Image (cartoon, rainbow, N blue to C red):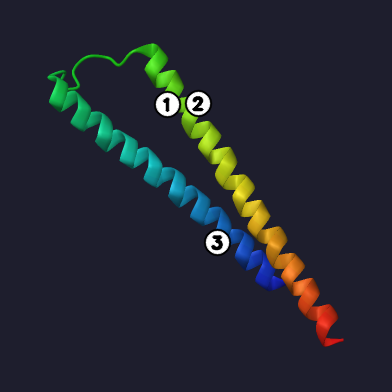
């Protein structure tokens, strides 16, 4: 595989991981604010259904981000192929 594609794939993977971590951190911050506003203070254990829903949401988001990254790589490959065919 071309070195540029290897680099692009690596950085897309890192971008997906960074985005996933950012979403996790954002959700944690929102959860803390909601707990503070409702007076729960975070000492109570969250409802099992709520935790499962958040985990499912994160898994779906991860899949979507991975799919988007794959689409971007495919688009880059198509553009490169079109460029190569045009310059022949």
Mark 3 in CB contact with mark 2 (< 8 angstroms): no
Alpha carbons under labels 3 and 2: distance apart: 25 Å
- When the figure is inspected, residue 43 is found, relative to residue 1, above or below; the finding is above
Query: What residue is rendered at 26% in x and 29% in y?
Result: 31
Residue that numbered label 1 is attached to: 54
Q: Earlier in the sequence, mark 1 or mark 3?
A: 3
Q: Which mark is residue 41?
A: none
Q: Is residue 12 left or right of residue 6?
A: left
Mark 2 in CB contact with mark 1 (< 8 angstroms): yes
Label total for image? 3
Position in image of residue 53 (x %, y %): 45, 21
Position in image of residue 34 (x %, y %): 21, 27
Position in image of residue 23 (x %, y %): 39, 42
Mark 1: secondary structure: helix
Residue that numbered label 2 is attached to: 56
Q: Quadrant of residue 5?
A: bottom right
- When the figure is inspected, residue 18 is found, relative to residue 59, above or below; the finding is below
Question: Which image quarter is the N terminus in?
Answer: bottom right
């Amino acid at each position: 595989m071309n070195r540029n594609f290897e680099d692009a794939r690596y950085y897309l993977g890192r971008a997906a991981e960074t985005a996933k971590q950012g979403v996790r951190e954002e959700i944690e911050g929102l959860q803390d604010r909601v707990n503070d506003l409702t007076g729960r203070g975070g000492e109570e254990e969250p409802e099992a259904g709520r935790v499962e829903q958040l985990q499912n949401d994160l898994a779906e988001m991860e899949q979507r981000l991975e799919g988007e990254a794959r689409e971007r790589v495919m688009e880059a490959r198509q553009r490169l192929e079109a460029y190569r065919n045009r310059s022949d």
